[in-house]
Amino acid sequence: MSLSKPRASIILGSHSDLEYGEKVVERLKSLGIESRIRIASAHRAPDFLREVIREEEETGSEVFVCIAGFSAHLPGVVASLTMKPVIGLPLDRGVMGLDSLFSMVQMPPGVPVAVVGINNTENAAILCARILSVKHPEVLDKLESFRDEMVRSVVEKDSRVREDG
Ligand code: RP5
């Protein structure tokens, strides 16, 4: 068991992204991970973003989840300013989310961002948990229970459909 608590930071490009950030926080909480939301646009407040990253690192945060829409350079800029793993969650705010997906995913070699699907708050949180589980066995236990529950649910649906058919 690691001495530090598993902790992540959620950075939003705008207050208007808040509902997505809250979903990520909720899922992380269910997996025993502390997190907090910050708002710091890469385009509108770049110097402030730099401060936010430093402050979040000082809290012991080990992963950054960056959520943004439109020309979503937030996770790429964060990845350039920290050595922690960065997850990008693109939002469907413009051209069906493809604008933000492409802005996040095509990073220059050397500065990776792990990008999940458009609006996929669930996978952003679970990927974050998987990264933290390498160091925190209590998170791994929770992820295993979560996976077992998914299996149970599929098997149950299969047997229900067989019985009905
Ligand atoms: C992006 O532009 C934000 O991440 C948000 O998704 C979008 C719109 O921002 P607001 O104009 O609502 O602040 O930078």
Image (spheres, grey):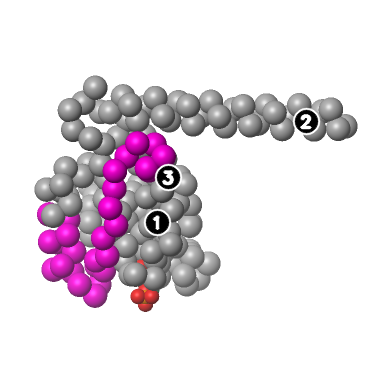
Q: Foreground residue, 83 or 145? A: 145
The residue sitting at 16% across, 42% down in the picture is 60
Give the secondary structure at mark 2. Answer: helix
Q: Foreground residue, 87 or 102? A: 87
Looking at the picture, does residue 160 appear above or below residue 17? above
The residue sitting at 37% across, 42% down in the picture is 29
Q: Which residues are magenta?
A: 28-54
Looking at the picture, does residue 41 appear above or below residue 64? below
Measured Cα–Cα span from mark 3 to mark 1: 9 Å
Can you identify the residue that label 2 sits on?
Answer: 160
**Residue 94: x percent and y percent?**
47, 72
Q: Which mark is residue 139?
A: none
Residue extending furthest bottom?
44
Residue flagged by tag 3: what amino acid is it? Arg
If you read the primary sequence from the N terminus, does the residue marked by circle 3 or circle 1 appear first? 1
Image quarter where ligand 1 lies: bottom left
Q: Which mark is residue 27?
A: 3
